[in-house]
Amino acid sequence: MSDVTIHGGLTIATVLYDLVNDEILAGTNITPADFWHGFDQAAHQLAPKNQALLETRARLQNQINNWLKTHSNDSIDPVAYEAFLSDIGYLHADDGDFDIETSNVDPEIATIAGPQLVVPITNARYSLNAANARWGSLYDALYGTDAISDAGGAEKTNSYNPVRGNKVIAFARDLLNKSAPLSIGSWNDVTGFAITDGALVVTMGDGHTGLGDHDQFVGYTGKADSPSSIILIKNGLHLEIIIDANGTIGAGDAAHINDVMVESALTSIIDLEDSIAAVDAEDKVLAYRNWNKIMRGTLTASFTKNGEMMDRKLNDDKSFIAADGSRQTLRGRALMLVRNVGHLMSNPAVLLSDGREIPEGILDAFISVAAALPDFASKQNSPAGSIYVVKPKMHGPDEVAFAVETFDMVERLLQLPANTIKIGIMDEERRTTVNLKECIRAAKSRVAFINTGFLDRTGDEIHTSMYAGAMIRKGDMKAAAWISAYEDWNVDIGLACGFSGKAQIGKGMWAMPDLMADMFTQKISHPKAGANCAWVPSPTAATLHALHYHEVDVAKRQAELTGKARASRSDILSIPVASRPNWSDEDIRAELRNNAQGILGYVVRWIDQGVGCSKVPDIHNVGLMEDRATLRISSQHIANWLQHKICDADLVMDVMKEMAAVVDAQNAGDASYEPMAGHFDQSIAFQAALDLVFKGIEQPSGYTEPVLHARRLEKKAQAKAA
């Protein structure tokens, strides 16, 4: 670091030091001197413990590698394997049943089921979009996506297509008939609305009707005899019917319904981890500043769209008149959580007294929570008075306990009541999955969230079991025995630990933001599985996925599932190896091409442009929302096939160069893009991709961060020197 400030035993990048002193702590009761003194002491106490946990990871992995090398020539004996994992301390004993004790959890997490967004904090516009995705236009979500088919002349055209519009209106009326049925008749025949004696009166021709369930009427805006909107509720989620006789749609609608606004993303994870590229103080300052501004309610963004400059800010709450005549409000923004990084990486933004970089998870814990202090005072984000921190990539109960110990220290330093900081446990590493109950126990007074993450979990599965044999093809992983057991186990354990009505049980991302028809067909499986939230890639996807929670009463579904164990740890520990690989040369090359294209398409933006999450076209030019989890599984899969001689280094190199040209062509329209083909030795991005594959086995837990961070720092240094 060139410009630093010394405070006690810490050497701090001055840009970070100034951000904390001048912006983050401004208006709080924590002085900069007290903060840095306490942080200095805590960091030096916690860092050695952090290192010891990483050494335990490495020791266990080496023991597993050696056992698999000895025992995997024939089929692995599952009983012997589990006994071995218990003997080395990988598997923990079950210490008995318990219920979590988490308190002061907001209803968006504890009792209402709905979609969840994850967005990069370094992009202010995306962060604002996520915060404001609490409400979405159903008409826009349907009209602008493939959720409505083009058949019968309903194509999307440059101007409004009334055929498509009529399909949208029919879909919305069908939703109302299902979600808020009338006592008599259909929403298709409604011609007007009024509020009389606190009840919704619906006109149909010469007659009147009302809701089949009067309790679904929440309130209205405008005049009682001529409302501007009607607010209804289904399974805790609101719908707002917009009435406008002069509106583009409302003018030609018998009931003058101009739109239906859907309560969509109840929660949004503002991400400091997988979806961003933060490798130094400069990057961390941008991330922390944006998070602090969100918590202060002051974040804004200006951008150009269709040649017009636009400004964006955080939405206000919705004001309305309730059924009892009182003036009420509905939340205008998603409840926001912040995802810190895991325990692995360090960051040069702060150096410890021995000159080592600070573990980045410790840095995130103290500064991201300090940045949330304004909300602890205002209660704009969390009326319950909690700060929600999602903690990823933890391996087992001891690592969860370390996160809890860290948050204990953060609370003492920042003068917060005990257990103000709630923890979200990402169930994406195998040692956490198989010990999930004990992981939850370690955080039973703080835990507010568990979820599954198929891609990271698969990457860890491949790396942990690297020497068991050649893995099945990546596309076959979702049909592997361990996957369904893992997904069910997460819900089973969460319910057994008393999550229902207290905390979130989540499911992973729908990664194809352009394929909304497929999402609408398939993602209903998540609430049916008993999950009360699931990740979506965009506000539009949140609006459509929210409709699944109208159809499925998740609380009822959880009650049905409670006590019904559907998965076993033995199933989860089954290893997805191909028993007798007999793939043709064409099959092998196709698999390598798919993996290599995904790796290169993501890495080139990460290294060259510092973009941690974006819509990356796959080998078939289908746009996928990619982050480091995708990279981890693809790189580990090739490394595994190299290890077991399914392919050789020459073939992999040939495919990598072939796919570099494909990725270059896919990015031809990006003026800032730097081609890889023809510049293989000079392209830092291409070299990073090679490192991930050819050095994949030596990467801790198969993580991509060590390679990405080192190569991104190299790229930034090159750019500064130019």
Image (cartoon, grey):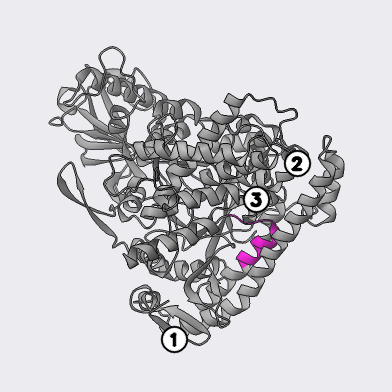
Which quarter of the figure has residue 476?
top right
Could you tell me which quadrant the N terminus lies in? bottom left
Q: Which amino acid does label 2 sit on?
A: Ala
Extent of the magenta region? 393-404
SS at badge 3: loop
- Residue mark closest to the camera, 3 vs 2: 3
Could you tell me which quadrant the C terminus lies in? bottom left
Chief secondary structure of the magenta span? helix
Q: Residue furthest left?
A: 246
Of residue 492 and residue 148, the one placed in the foreground of this image is 148
541 left or right of 410 in image: left
Return the mark for residue 33. Answer: 1
Crowd band around label 1 with a 10 angstrom C-alpha radius: few (<14), some (14–19), many (20+): few
227 in relation to 95, above or below: above
Return the mark for residue 468. Answer: 2
Q: Which amino acid does label 1 sit on?
A: Ala
Question: Mark 3 — residue?
Answer: 697
Is 399 part of what is drawn in magenta?
yes
- Residue mark closest to the camera, 1 vs 3: 3
Q: Position of residue 272 (x, y in %)?
A: 45, 58
- Residue mark closest to the camera, 1 vs 2: 2
Tell me whether circle 1 and circle 3 mark residues in contact (CB < 8 Å).
Answer: no
Can residue 269 be seen at all in this image of the molecule?
no
Which quarter of the figure has residue 714?
bottom left
- Spatial CA distance of label 1 from label 2 is 53 Å
Is 403 part of what is drawn in magenta?
yes
Labels 1 and 2: the sequence-earlier one = 1
Of residue 305 and residue 292, the one placed in the foreground of this image is 305
Give the residue drawn at x 40%, y 60%.
715
